[in-house]
Image (spheres, rainbow, N blue to C red):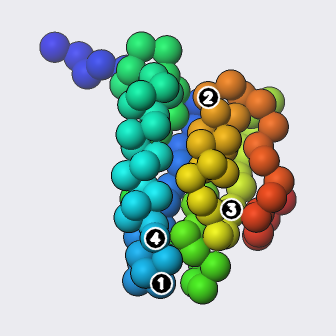
Amino acid sequence: MPAKFFPTNGHLLVCQNGTCQRLGSPLLFQALWQHLERENLAYYKAGGTVRLTQSGCLGACGYGPTLCVYRQRGGQLEEAWYGAVDFPLAARIARAVQDESDLPTEHRYGPE
């Protein structure tokens, strides 16, 4: 039996390294996971296209929790990096990925 294909619009990674954990990344990850489930945004839900993964250090220690987004948009890889992410911002990022709309600009760092 072939594996089931789950289309995705993008991938969110939430840092779970030491400093980010002390600044609340485990709670952010759990809240975001529940949000993706509840709003049917998770890639394995009907109509959902957002993947969520825990990650190691994303390079903004002390500004956590940090979150990184990778997605294909307009035929090119788009990436965005965020520091000091709270749940409302993470939920807006997830919605933008799902809707293929512009990502929020607040708290972004790194490559543009």
Q: Amino acid at mark 3?
A: Trp
Mark 3 or mark 2: name the one nearer the start of the chain. Answer: 3
Figure quadrant of the N terminus: top left
The answer to whether residue 43 is visible is no
Give the CA separation, mark 2 to mark 4. 24 Å
Q: Position of residue 55 (x, y in %)?
A: 43, 64
Q: Nearer the viewer, residue 24 or 55?
A: 24
Label tally:
4
* Residue 98 versus residue 76 in the image, above or below: above
Q: 93 left or right of 5?
A: right
Mark 2 or mark 1: name the one nearer the start of the chain. Answer: 1
For the point 41% across and 28% down, which residue is it? Answer: 38
Q: Position of residue 57 (x, y in %)?
A: 49, 76
Q: Position of residue 49 (x, y in %)?
A: 52, 27
Mark 2 or mark 4: name the one nearer the start of the chain. Answer: 4
Give the CA separation, mark 4 to mark 3. 17 Å
For the point 66% across and 69% down, which residue is it? Answer: 83
Q: Position of residue 8 (x, y in %)?
A: 52, 29
Q: Amino acid at mark 1?
A: Thr
Disc on res. 81: 3
Give the CA separation, mark 3 to mark 2. 17 Å
Mark 2 or 4, which is nearer the eye? 4
Q: Residue furthest left?
A: 1
Give the CA separation, mark 1 to mark 4. 9 Å
Disc on res. 19: 1
Disc on res. 24: 4
